[in-house]
Image (cartoon, rainbow, N blue to C red):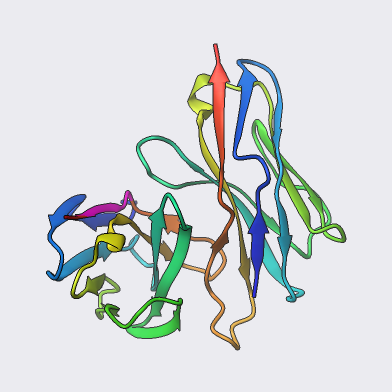
Amino acid sequence: AQTVTQSQPEMSVQEAETVTLSCTYDTSESDYYLFWYKQPPSRQMILVIRQEAYKQQNATENRFSVNFQKAAKSFSLKISDSQLGDAAMYFCAIISTYSGAGSYQLTFGKGTKLSVIP
Amino acid sequence: KAGVTQTPRYLIKTRGQQVTLSCSPISGHRSVSWYQQTPGQGLQFLFEYFSETQRNKGNFPGRFSGRQFSNSRSEMNVSTLELGDSALYLCASSWTDNEQFFGPGTRLTVL
């Protein structure tokens, strides 16, 4: 079984500042993918960034980057130059690439609600 | 390319009724997954279909079922609705098995 833990239920950041959202996970698989999804009030789940476990290089997408520490099973999201539109729920998720047990399912954390202060 | 679409967007039912939700994946995507989102339990996996076959199922009672058609469109059905079934039901489609794109969800309210 896989688990994802987001220890920060809520966070806030000043506009234009940087914020880091924490995520730890547990899996017995060696091959897996990690994701950060954003869910604004509209409820549409939007993929922010993904990280392949076999890659040592941290993924980056514009203002979003991750700090992936495989040994520590940690996967934090850094948002730089925060904008008002970044306000949303952020979910960390993991998916195993092992299909033998039919494991093609995302396991999500409980989410972190991010507020952006003008 | 059009995104994942879900119909209806909102639904109100009463206890004991049944409901069918529909999901149309992104063109070319053959895998469709369903998730239930509630404030208490968060996001929970319901089931996943690929080429009309259920490949994986989450820990939900048999009242929850689904199917996938040859055009990859999927439906999920909940029979004998309970108050606790009130939730946002999200559908996601994927081309590869490691990146899922979500629809806007169907908000189900059971009275």
A117 over A18 or under it: above or below: above
Residue B104 in the image: x percent, y percent? 32, 49
Percent x, y for residue A89? 51, 39
Residue that lies at the very extreme toward the right in this rendered image: A71
Considering the image in quadrants, where does the C terminus of chain A appear? Answer: top right
The dominant secondary structure in magenta is strand
Give the side of residue A12 with respect to residue B83, left or right: right
Pick whichever, B60 or B72, lies toward us.
B60
Give the left or right position of residue B32, taking residue A15 as reference.
left
Would residue B107 be counted in the magenta stretch?
yes
- The answer to whether A1 is drawn above or below residue B34 in the figure is below
Judge whether B98 appears above or below A97 on screen. above
Q: Residue at x 68, y 45 (%)?
A: A7
Q: Residue at x 77, y 74 (%)?
A: A30
Of all residues shown, which one is farthest toward the top?
A118
Q: Position of residue B10 (x, y in %)?
A: 19, 49
Q: Quadrant of the N terminus of chain A?
A: bottom right
Please provide the residue range marked out in magenta: B104-109
**Left or right: B43, with B78 as reference point:** right
User: Where residue B52 appears, x then y in whole percent?
Assistant: 32, 83
